[in-house]
Image (cartoon, rainbow, N blue to C red):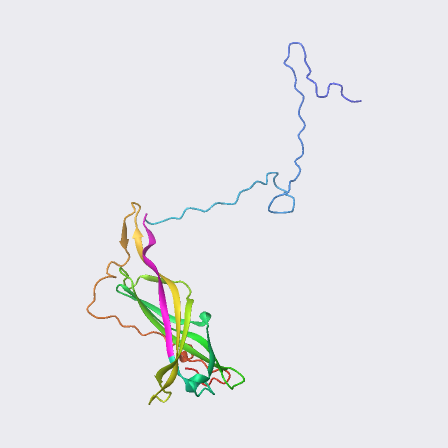
Amino acid sequence: MGNKNCGRRIEVPGKLPIKPKKRKKKCKPEQCHEDPKPCTSTCNCNNEAAGPKPAHLTNDCVLVNSLVGSKTVQKVAETTLPISLFEGLVDLEDIVSINVVPNLDAITQNARIIRDKVVNIGLIPATITITIAGIDLPVTLNTTIPFQEHTDFPGACPEDTLQETPLEVEGIFTQPGVPVVDVAGLTLVEGILFKIVLRTTITVTRPVIQDRFGQVCDVNPNRCDTSTTAPSFTLPTPENGGLLGGGGGGGVGV
């Protein structure tokens, strides 16, 4: 027989009202956002990932990069090749067309900073194709074209950090009829001038120490000291000696 007073307040004269005991509801496992399986230990799944912990520093100074300067510059790759390198080409008047395709992904270059200047030396691989009158197939030569450039950069000093954007081609020029020393190095012969104008952005930065008041000092305070001896550099040898094999009918590379 059920209790008719279930859930009701029972009052007895001279005594405080007796409140009925509340039944505890069983906790049903909820689905965690991170784990598709039910949570067995708790119903609260609103757990947050632990945030980054502060670093324990020995002082309040930090190392930062100070901008010395940034500028867009041009570099020129240029060479003159004798027409004897192109098989079947005897007379310049037989040239129908010249096509030069530089390979920007295979450029080899080295850069150094001296006082107030940035110096670049490099090689750009290129495929030269010449269509010759009276010859069925074009003549192809794979070669490398050297370039070097020095850029005035006031304030730049040795041990500064140099960054350059990937080189872009601004223009390609060819000029048949330019005299050049032959392969044997004995006499002047007819040649073809090849020139590629490249563009890049040079950025020079300097590591400095900054305190909590914003004051900075150079990591190397002597980097810009004037030296009586000119700096000298020996750059690494390019892969394959900087030479590429000739293509179909193009003879040896240069």
Residue interval drawn in magenta: 60-79
Q: Is residue 229 left or right of residue 165?
A: left
Which of the 4 quarters of the picture holds residue 228?
A: bottom left
Tag count: 0
| Closer-to-camera residue (95/173) | 95
Residue 9 vertical placement versus 201 (above, below): above
Task: Examine the structure image and report whether residue 124 is included in the region drawn in magenta.
Answer: no
Quadrant of the image for the C terminus? bottom left
Residue 91 vertical placement versus 153 (above, below): below
Q: Position of residue 41 (x, y in %)?
A: 61, 41
| Closer-to-camera residue (19/251) | 251
Quadrant of the image for the N terminus? top right
Q: Among all residues in the image, which is located at the extreme left?
A: 228
Q: Among all residues in the image, which is located at the extreme right?
A: 1
Q: Among all residues in the image, which is located at the extreme top?
A: 13
Q: Position of residue 179 (x, y in %)?
A: 35, 83
Task: Examine the structure image and report whether residue 65 is included in the region drawn in magenta.
Answer: yes
